[in-house]
Amino acid sequence: MAGSLQVKDFVDPETGEIQRFLIAELETNRDFVRIHRAFIEAMLRDLDYLNGAIKLLIWFINKALGCRMFNKPAEIFVFVEEVMRELRVKRRTVHRYLKLLKEKGYIIQLKKNRPVYMLNPEYIWLGTAKSYAEYIRNRRQILLSSQK
């Protein structure tokens, strides 16, 4: 699947701030993975701190891509046993990784005490540029509802 890699700027409608994104566009259906520069910078900064939790973050991204969760925040139900098996780690380690990723803002737990998480769309977006711009307009409502 051939594609292109480019940088695009988006204007935050609330603040007027320009945000730059690295976008990988696929030729066949024009879906793309948008990875915010801040995500790359934060991940590199946090690499030592997060250590193995990066494996879980990549697991989240692969799960979202595999389920074709495009044009909306990627919500993922986490079966601890599945993660344990796929990453070859213990239950305690999965919970520690989840805690680290939540603390650093890479993932958002949608409801307390429920294993449903969302990739932080401020860092990672799977979909079109148009859908991301629409998300930016509505993000306050989404984040407020995730804190309930």
Image (tube, grey):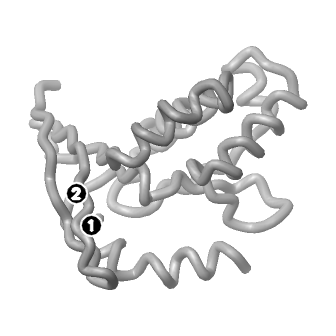
- Callout 2: SS: loop
Give x and y (percent) for residue 85: 75, 20
Using the image as rendered, state which of residue 82 and residue 15 is in the foreground.
15
**Residue 84: which quarter of the image?**
top right
What percent of the width, then of the height, locates residue 80? 79, 36
Residue sitting at x 76%, y 53%: 115
Disc 1 marks a residue whose amino acid type is Ser
- Label 2 packing within 10 angstroms: few (<14), some (14-19), many (20+): some
The numbered disc on residue 131 is 1
Q: Position of residue 33 (x, y in %)?
A: 30, 43
What kind of element bears circle 1? helix
The residue to which callout 2 is attached is 128
Q: Which picture quadrant has residue 52?
A: top right
- Quarter placement of the N terminus: top left
Q: Residue at left 39%, top 81%?
A: 138
Q: Name the foreground residue: 38 vs 137.
A: 38
Q: Residue at x 10, y 34 (%)?
A: 4
Disc 1: CA contacts within 10 A as few (<14), some (14-19) or many (>=20)? some
The numbered mark at residue 60 is none
Which corner quadrant holds the C terminus?
bottom right
Decide if residue 118 is on the left or right side of residue 49.
Answer: left
